[in-house]
Amino acid sequence: MTERLSAHEMLDLVLDTDSYVSWDRPPIRVDTDPAYRADLDAAEAKTGLDESVITGEGAVRGRRVAVIACEFGFLAGSIGVAAAERIVSAVERATAESLPLLASPTSGGTRMQEGTLAFVQMVKIAAAITVHKATHLPYLVYLRNPTTGGVFASWGSLGHVTVAQPGALIGFLGPRVYQALYGEKFPDGVQTAENLYANGVIDGVVEPKWLRHLVHRALRVMTGESDEWVDGHPEPAEIPDVPAWQSVMLSRRTDRPGIRQLLRYAATEQVPLSGTGQGEADKTVLVSLARFRGAPCVLFGQDRSGQSAQHTMGPAALREARRAMKLAEELGIPLVLVIDTLGASLSKEAEERGLAPEIARCLADLVTLDTATVSVLLGQGTGGGALALLPADRVLCAQNGWLAPLPPEGASAIVHRDTTHAPSMAAAQGIRSLDLLRDGVVDAIIPEVPDAADEPIGFSKRVGEAIARELSRLVDVPAEQRYRTRIARYRNLGIAGE
């Protein structure tokens, strides 16, 4: 049985000792029914609180944070007019004072004693949080056991980062209501924190004792805090003039480091996220809040360890990419994209779920994104799945990275009706790093000494330093100038010499 943490117990676990200051005023009176008034009085006597939610501010390792926490013991944490007004007032104050906001719902949903008027309060709560996020302020959500109904369907599901208590009952329609309406028990194992995490609805499952650490790490990235920017320009390395086919073969080594090694060896902070938030998760990609040499970013990339010839990226992967784009834009921090794919999925499911339209939407969103962007061609760059993550303010390429409309074998099959011409097709199409640099597709090449697979730690750190360096150059460039330069870059690609 998953424990139920009280509102104050939850805050005590997260906030610095004695840092909590309440923002609450006496709740507005909306009760006209004596029986309802008696319920409210009993709930207050039981919990020592005057409503189902408490709000205020505290500190997390010295950083001011606004907090909202439900109390399930007060009429099952239900939200009526008074509770909603308290929540909205707290959100608006957090926005006015430029404070990140941590919300921890636990609720049965709308307060039935107040009916439809309570039900529509979720609209104004969602609106207030949307305004808060529009000012580039972080909104984190910790779902406690249980969280259901309108609370989960509004402010419980709007977090930039959303995690839940292990074993927590999380769902839209409460199991008791479902059984009453349909005459049967809701299927086991569906409305659990773990299942929603596995299906890409929430970002993770976190023990209460680790929540403070997670909030601290997340806010260090989400607030754009930086402290170790990399300055200067490294000495340009001499990139060997090797055949394109050699790079293709080296990029396919099973021991070549990918995005996970980049995070492990080069990131100074990371908070893994998961899924689209809409019930999809693709194991061929990875998304995380991260810092490289103190430079904060949202990191999204293709994970070579999750790919195989039978398991390639599908439409959900691109919807996760678009979630990462939106997250970076809302927080006002840079986006870093890692390309390392052997190609997008060729399947009935991928076609029917909109693979091609998702590639198009990724391109459109990324090229017009209102935040700094860096793309890294880390290894294989096959087809539309690679192109979807390419257009950025700065594009880096590993020495043996490459980009092509099809794998060279596929190009050979189209042109020569066989695959034996793959090496010559790779050379002719200009897919290798030196060709991409010459043609203006990439801005810089990251050396491999002599091959990334032979020096995974050194190579990963070199990539991390290159990312940090590019971010440090972009951070002070006005958004409008970045946008104009990005559009002009792709508008003139291939015709600069005309």
Image (cartoon, rainbow, N blue to C red):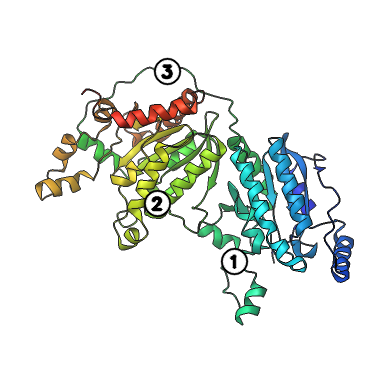
Q: Which residue is pictured at 65% across the width and 39% down the height?
A: 216
Q: Which residue is pictured at 12% across the width and 46% down the height?
A: 415
Q: Which residue is pictured at 67% across the width and 39% down the height?
A: 100
Q: Which residue is mark 1?
A: 191
Identify the element where label 1 is drawn: loop
Which badge, 2 or 1, comes first in the chain's sequence? 1
Q: Which residue is mark 3?
A: 233
- Residue depth check, mark 3 versus mark 1: number of the one nearer the observer: 1
Query: Label 2, label 1: how many angstroms apart (C-alpha)?
Result: 27 Å
Q: Which residue is pictured at 85% across the width and 64% down the height?
A: 40
User: Is residue 217 shown above or below 167?
Assistant: above
The answer to which of 277 and 459 lies nearer the viewer is 277
Q: Residue 419's spot in the image, x, y percent?
A: 14, 48
- Is residue 426 rendered to the left or right of residue 486? left
Q: Residue 464's spot in the image, x, y percent?
A: 45, 31
| Circle 1 Cα neighbour tier, 10 Å, few/some/many (<14 / 14–19 / ≥20) | many
Query: Label 3, label 1: how many angstroms apart (C-alpha)?
Result: 52 Å
Three-letter code, disc 1: Gln
Which badge, 3 or 1, comes first in the chain's sequence? 1
Identify the element where label 2 is drawn: helix
Three-letter code, disc 2: Gly
Q: Which residue is mark 2?
A: 306
The answer to which of 15 and 495 lies nearer the viewer is 495
Query: Label 3, label 2: how many angstroms apart (C-alpha)?
Result: 34 Å
- Is residue 264 rendered to the left or right of residue 362? right
User: Is residue 44 shown above or below 368?
Assistant: below
- Residue 379 has which mark? none
Three-letter code, disc 3: His
Which badge, 3 or 2, comes first in the chain's sequence? 3
- Is residue 80 rendered to the left or right of residue 36? left
